[in-house]
Image (cartoon, rainbow, N blue to C red):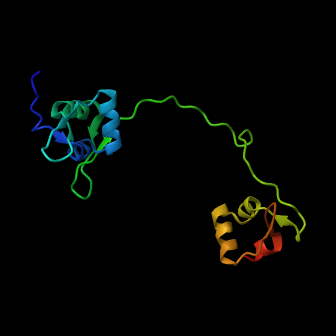
Amino acid sequence: MKQMNVDNWLTKQEVCARLACSERTIERLAKEGRLKKKLRHISGRKSLAVYSPESVADLQEQNLRSVPVGPGGMALATIRSRALPIVPMKPEEDRAVDVPSLPAAPNAFLTISQAAHYLGTTKAFIKRAIAAGTLPATKDRCTRIRKTDVEKL
């Protein structure tokens, strides 16, 4: 069997630079067969994956379009987007929104998600405040925080 000369083939990093994509995308394209891949044998080392310059050029022509030169002087490339159908959004009242209900009593206890909704923050913020000791909480089946303590925060 005749050996193919892969000395002028491109490495994964070179292909990434030419196509402006990640190494994982390069591997996916090779697996799909859109990018021709061979192994360059190096004595005493692990074989190096290399890619055909012709298939890289074909991909550049098919999938990439040039973008005007930016302020840095470098031309950027973006992948041409496929046309997707436009689906109209539902009106606000039809969308299901998971908003935890808040108790009306001022001395009531709130869960972490209720406290986060009440303050307009994330659950992680509330958890960090509890861990730091700035927000007192009790642990009874779940973490509970007094509504007055939340208002003080």
Q: Residue 80 placed where, x, y %?
A: 34, 35
Compared to residue 123, the image places residue 149 above or below, namely below
Q: Residue at x 21, y 34 (%)?
A: 56
Instruction: Give the tally of numbered discs.
Output: 0
Compared to residue 38, the image places residue 144 above or below, namely below
Residue farthest along the front direction in this orientation:
44
Residue farthest along the top direction in this orientation:
1
Compared to residue 149, the image places residue 29 above or below, namely above
Q: Is residue 118 left or right of residue 19?
A: right
Q: Residue at x 30, y 27 (%)?
A: 33
Image quadrant where one finds the C terminus: bottom right
Q: Residue at x 68, y 67 (%)?
A: 126
Q: Residue at x 73, y 48 (%)?
A: 98
Q: Is residue 115 left or right of residue 22?
A: right
For the residue pair 19 and 86, the one nearer the viewer reads as 19
User: Is residue 80 visible from the viewing direction of this image?
Assistant: yes
Q: Residue 12 placed where, x, y %?
A: 24, 43
Q: Is residue 121 left or right of residue 14?
A: right
Q: Quadrant of residue 1?
A: top left
Compared to residue 130, the image places residue 74 above or below, namely above
Q: Residue 89 placed where, x, y %?
A: 62, 37
Q: Residue 11 placed where, x, y %?
A: 20, 43
User: Is residue 122 visible from the viewing direction of this image?
Assistant: no
